[in-house]
Image (cartoon, rainbow, N blue to C red):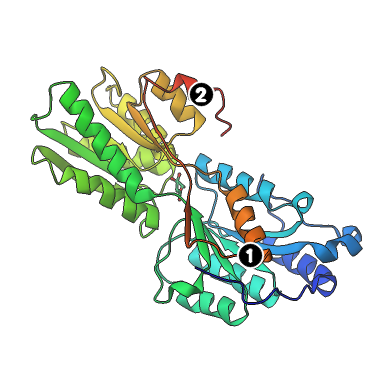
């Protein structure tokens, strides 16, 4: 639990120009399609003295899920909602993320929100934030730090549970189709190595797989959460192994690439296909493939975390206590239930 010991000084008037200058520095000229422009110099007026300055460090733009997550945080932490956002995209580099956070600290932002690329290596920079009295809110992934008080709270998903859900879905499906005791060869496509989601989804899936002597994990391979890598890695797997029964993929983007590779090899996927596919994230294009029977099951990972981050900040502003972790709701989609969710999927 974290209690804001004291309401922070509102030093926005001085900050205005500093923030603008630094935002330009941090964001550079290459702004992402979801870039939420900070104020122009002429826009900075008295009203902005009351805005809450939030430095947002996004880890990259590797997937459809990530774009949705970026959109969610940028819509919630906006001027209309009383914030002055300074956004930075670290493009899959931890050093860039650390540099961005250090920039936020030197600008004395009111809050830092960041989606950590990997689990380790944050102690020093977060100690700097703590020493500067700037509350840090983790979005999406987890971190592993000696001192848990280095961050206030995390708003994210339960990746361990997602991995388990994938395992339990497979268990039930094999039992339902009378293959509960057959030998089942599985390939696992993993996301960014060292990220908490890669570690936890793998652990969750293995937890269930370990209960089944007839499940053989042929290989777990890194494919960086991207479509191109998913395709490349799946091509290699198909050359190496003749009899893959199941593909377990830790995100939809890798799944899209892997399905292409499978089709290019003259094989099919999904219900009645040669290879069963379990995917993760459940973005719209993947749900369409669930509907078409090309993906057997998709384990939802919910990117819409911005509102919750904003609620946490508002609580802290009021001096209220917040929980150490807020986990968003998630489902499992199959051909049996996907129809009712397709129309409302916005990403
Ligand atoms: O599953 C993947 C993204 O950290 C939960 O990162 C997130 C994962 C998501 O690139 O698509």
Badge 1 marks a residue whose secondary structure is helix
Q: In the image shown, does 54 or 226 lie closer to the viewer?
A: 54
Q: Residues within 10 Å of mark 1 (few under 14, many from 20)?
A: many
The residue beneath circle 1 is 316
Give the Cα distance between marks 2 and 1.
36 Å
Let me know if residue 45 appears in the view. no
Along the horizontal axis of the image, is 229 left or right of 89?
left
Q: Residue furthest bottom?
A: 131
The residue sitting at 40% across, 64% down in the picture is: 119
Q: In the image shown, does 34 or 111 lie closer to the viewer?
A: 111
Badge 2 marks a residue whose secondary structure is helix
Let me know if residue 283 appears in the view. yes
The residue sitting at 23% across, 33% down in the picture is: 170
- The C terminus, quarter of image: top right
The quadrant holding residue 114 is bottom right
The residue sitting at 13% across, 22% down in the picture is: 178
The residue beneath circle 2 is 342
Residue 274 image point, x, y percent: 23, 23
Along the horizontal axis of the image, is 216 left or right of 165?
left
Tell me the tag on residue 62: none
């Amino acid at each position: 639990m974290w209690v804001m010991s004291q309401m922070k000084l509102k030093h926005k008037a001085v900050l205005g120009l500093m923030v603008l200058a630094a935002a330009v520095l941090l964001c550079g000229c290459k702004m992402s399609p979801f870039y939420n422009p900070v104020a122009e110099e002429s826009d900075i007026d008295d009203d902005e003295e009351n805005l809450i300055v939030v430095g947002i460090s996004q880890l990259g733009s590797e997937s459809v899920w990530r774009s949705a997550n970026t959109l969610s945080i940028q819509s919630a932490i906006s001027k209309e909602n009383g914030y002055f956002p300074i956004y930075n995209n670290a493009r899959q580099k931890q050093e860039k993320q650390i540099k961005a956070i250090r920039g936020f600290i030197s600008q004395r932002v009111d809050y830092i929100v960041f989606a950590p690329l990997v689990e380790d290596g944050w102690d020093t920079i977060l100690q700097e934030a703590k020493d500067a009295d700037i509350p840090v809110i983790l979005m999406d992934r987890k971190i592993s730090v000696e001192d848990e008080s280095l961050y206030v709270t995390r708003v994210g998903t339960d990746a361990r549970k997602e991995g388990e859900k994938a395992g339990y879905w497979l268990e039930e499906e094999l039992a339902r189709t009378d293959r509960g005791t057959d030998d089942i060869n599985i390939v696992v496509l993993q996301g960014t190595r060292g990220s908490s989601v890669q570690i936890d989804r793998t652990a969750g899936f293995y937890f269930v797989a370990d209960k089944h002597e007839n499940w053989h994990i042929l290989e777990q391979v890194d494919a960086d959460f991207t479509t191109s890598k998913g395709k490349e890695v799946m091509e290699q797997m198909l050359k190496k192994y003749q009899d893959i029964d199941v593909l377990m993929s830790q995100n939809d983007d890798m799944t899209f690439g892997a399905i292409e590779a499978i089709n290019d090899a003259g094989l099919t996927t999904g219900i009645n296909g040669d290879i069963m596919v379990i995917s993760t994230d459940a973005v719209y294009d993947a749900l369409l493939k669930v509907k078409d029977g090309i993906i057997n099951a998709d384990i939802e990972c919910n990117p819409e975390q911005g509102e919750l981050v904003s609620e946490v900040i508002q609580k802290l502003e009021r001096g209220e206590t917040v929980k150490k972790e807020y986990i968003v709701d998630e489902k499992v989609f199959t051909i049996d239930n996907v129809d009712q969710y397709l129309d409302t999927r916005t990403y």
